[in-house]
Structure formats: structure tokens, C-alpha cells
Amino acid sequence: MHHSTGLKIGVFGGTFNPVHLGHLRAAEEVYEKFDLDKILFIPAARPPHKTDATVAVFEHRWNMLEVAIAGNPHFELSDIEKLRSGKSYSVDTLRNLRETYPEESSLYFLLGLDAFLDILSWHAFKELFLLTDFIILARPGYTVDKAGILLHDEISPGYQFKKEKICFVHKDRKFKNVYFCCVTLLDISSTSIREHIQAGHSIRYLVPNEVAEYVERRRVYSSEGGE
């Protein structure tokens, strides 16, 4: 534990519709590589970018996450977005977490590269870079060029790439760091899992067994059921 310098907390938000092995493996790798104290999984209660039709009810997404991370002592589930009314904006979640944890704690916001490149459409996106470090989850062979242009043009021209850290650092530290992390299994997508289910195909080895069982038992993504 890093008590002298506060906690190092990974923040992994998303619809988790459903959570799959790509999410869990990425979180585990980030936990180890960045020497974090824990990773908070924060399912979005009312995702601002998603239409309701494609998103399972919060209770199901929460329950699937709960069984998926049970048994991992450094993974934790947070209902911070469920407890707040209105759209689940990341900036509000990060403000809340900043108030919850000691001042010297560090937050690391996990985000896929595609989602990061879409961040200009997020609510109050610029403030995110004052609240949290980012860990961009990327596939092998990715480039940092587009992310660098976005940071320089839209957030602050003070960002510079540090090759040895695979990280964009701001010259006056006002804005937080943006790290890149190559993780395995990012090719699994929740969308393709839902398509498999609707086609009556197996989702074994894409999600934890407990999640597959839950989906089947509660008919989460079947056309007839799911409430």
C-alpha cells in the first residue's frame, strides 16, 4: 500500500453491457503495470451516449459485474453513478471521487483508445484532464499521433510526449498525465457478445462462466425477456 502518498486508484467506467474477459484482463494488467492499490469498476447508470434499447437494465449490468469480479481482492464495484440523478457524466464521477479519497491520492482513468479519441463529445471534457491521469488501453501496433494532436489542439499545447514513459506529460503539471498501455484481449466487444446471444450462439470463453450463466438464467439479452 502507498499510504505515505495516498492511494493509487484505477477508475474503470463503462456500460459493461455485458462485462467480458477483455475488460477484466485489461484491468488486471493495468493494476500490475501501474502498481495500483485497486481498480474501481463503475457501471454507468444512465450512459449519455447510448440509447436505452441496447443497454440492459442497471441491475443486470451490476449483477454481472459483481459475479465477474468476485474473488479478486483488488477489484471493487462502485455504485457512485447509480446514486446520482441525471446522465452519468464521467466528470461528475471524478469530482465525486476526488472528494471521497484523500487529497494526495491519484486517480487513473482507464479508457480505450477509440473512446479517448471521441472525448471531445464528452460533457466538460477539458476538466477531466485536471482531475485524473488517463491510462489509454491500446492494441499492439497503435500510434499515439491522433491522441497527441487532440491533446495539443483541444486540451493544451503544453503536452509533450515522453517516449521512455509512453506518456504525454504537461510542461507545467497543471494538466494530468496521459499514459498508453498495450493490453491483451481488447478485440472482444460487448456488441458482438450480444449478437452471439441473439443468434443463439455460445458466449463461453468471452465472458466469465458466472456471467454466461447469469445471462442465460435471466435471459438478459434475449428478445423475449431481460427485465
Image (spheres, rainbow, N blue to C red):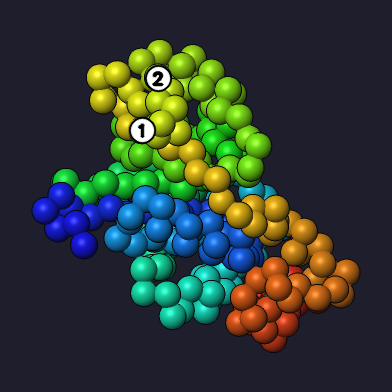
Mark 2 / mark 1, whichever is N-terminal: 2
Q: Which one is in front, 73 or 12?
A: 73
User: Which of the pair 124/134 is nearer the observer?
Assistant: 134
Q: Which mark is residue 155?
A: none
Cα–Cα span, label 2 and label 1: 10 Å
Residue in the picture at 29% in, 18% down: 171
48 or 114: nearer the viewer:
114
Quadrant in the rendering for residue 170: top left
Q: Residue furthest left?
A: 4
Q: Residue 30 location in percent, x, y? A: 44, 54
Residue 44 at x, y percent in the picture:
50, 56
Q: Residue at x 49, y 14 (%)?
A: 153
* Quadrant where the C terminus is found in the figure: bottom right
Quadrant of the drawing holding the N terminus: bottom left
- Residue 66 drawn above or below residue 175: below
Residue under label 2? 160
Please give the residue where the numbered disc 1 appears in the rendered image. Answer: 177
Q: Is residue 212 above or below residue 33?
A: below
Q: Amino acid at mark 2?
A: Gln
Residue 46 position, x and y percent, is 53, 54
72 lies above or below 140: below
Image coords of residue 96 (percent x, y): 29, 50
Q: Residues within 10 Å of mark 1 (few under 14, many from 20)?
A: many
Q: Does 124 sit left or right of 7 as displayed?
A: right
- For the residues labelled 2 and 1, say whether their Cβ atoms are less than 8 Å apart: no
Can residue 124 be seen here?
no
Judging from the image, what secondary structure is the residue with disc 2 in?
Answer: strand
| Amino acid on which disc 1 is placed | Asn
